[in-house]
Amino acid sequence: MPRSQVRIPSLVVVPLSEVLILNCLSVMNRPHCDLYEGVKLEVSLQAHNMRQVAHLIIAMQRMKNTQRLQGTEFSDQELLNIMMENASLESFYRCNVADQYQKSLVLNEEALELQAMTLQGGSFQRRVQLNLSMYVTPSYSSGKGQPVTLGIVDTNLYLSCSSENGMPILQLEVKVNLMLQLQRKRLYPLHLSDTFLQKGDRTLHDHFESARYQGWFISTALQEREPVEMCTKQEANRITSFRVK
């Protein structure tokens, strides 16, 4: 079908119960809707809940509004970005995190980094607490890990994984009023660089994998007072197992 004849389904937002309705009668009257060459939309008669429908509609709207004009194909990374941006906040809580050798996380304000060290007695007040926010997103099943963001309590600092010279690195980034936004909004634009996949039993053996650079995990060194960094699980001199409580 020529591009000039394409009709994009309209999106109607109904305030009652925040129900979103996709008005596309022409699509419902036939099994396929060929929008562009090489792109097909299939209508399934399988029942879905309203959360799934809302995620699907938002994703379609983002695809329609994309600025990419080179073609109609989306890379795996682009599709992952779209779906991760349609995440809803499930819960969040404050927690203490220590590695499997009981080294606590301490903020080095001068270097703006987290370090791991063994604390005793009154020095426990130096350890940081984290705001651990958990999300529901259609991009990840439970087997792939729980999408979370990790922020330092009483600050605007959040853990983020970016790339430097082709190598994933862990950083602390300032996110102003992010917790306030999380509490007020049901849907939140979840960015891959700020997102980690929590894996394990959420008690003694938790691992935090970067959502953007999968295969890379938050880790501590065997030595004291060393920075918390990203590593692969194969690195024998790094610790990727944490206790969250």
Image (cartoon, helix red, strand yellow):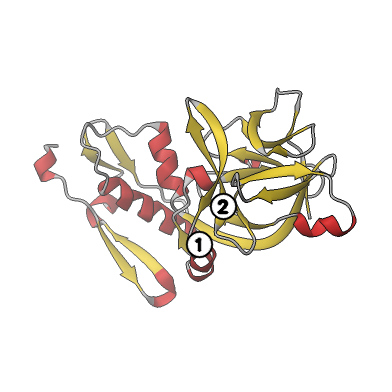
Q: Which residue carries the number 1 mark?
A: 178
* Residue lying at 64% horizontally and 36% vertically, measured from the top left: 229
> Residue lying furthest front in this view?
110
Residue at x 47%, y 25% (from the top left corner): 165
Residue 123 in percent (x, y) is at 83, 56
Count residues near mark 1 (Cα–Cα under 10 Å), then give few for <14, some for 14-19, many for 20+: few
Horizontally, residue 57 falls left or right of residue 184, namely left
**Residue at the image point whose x is 76% and y is 56% from the top:** 126
Quarter assignment of residue 94: bottom right
Q: Which residue is mark 2?
A: 158
- Residue under the point 40% across and 47% down: 44
* Image quarter hosting the C terminus: bottom right
Residue kind at label 2, given as amino acid type = Tyr
Left or right? Give the position of 93 relative to 26. right
The relative height of residue 137 versus residue 162 in the rendered view (above or below) is: below
Mark 1 vs mark 2: which is more N-terminal? 2
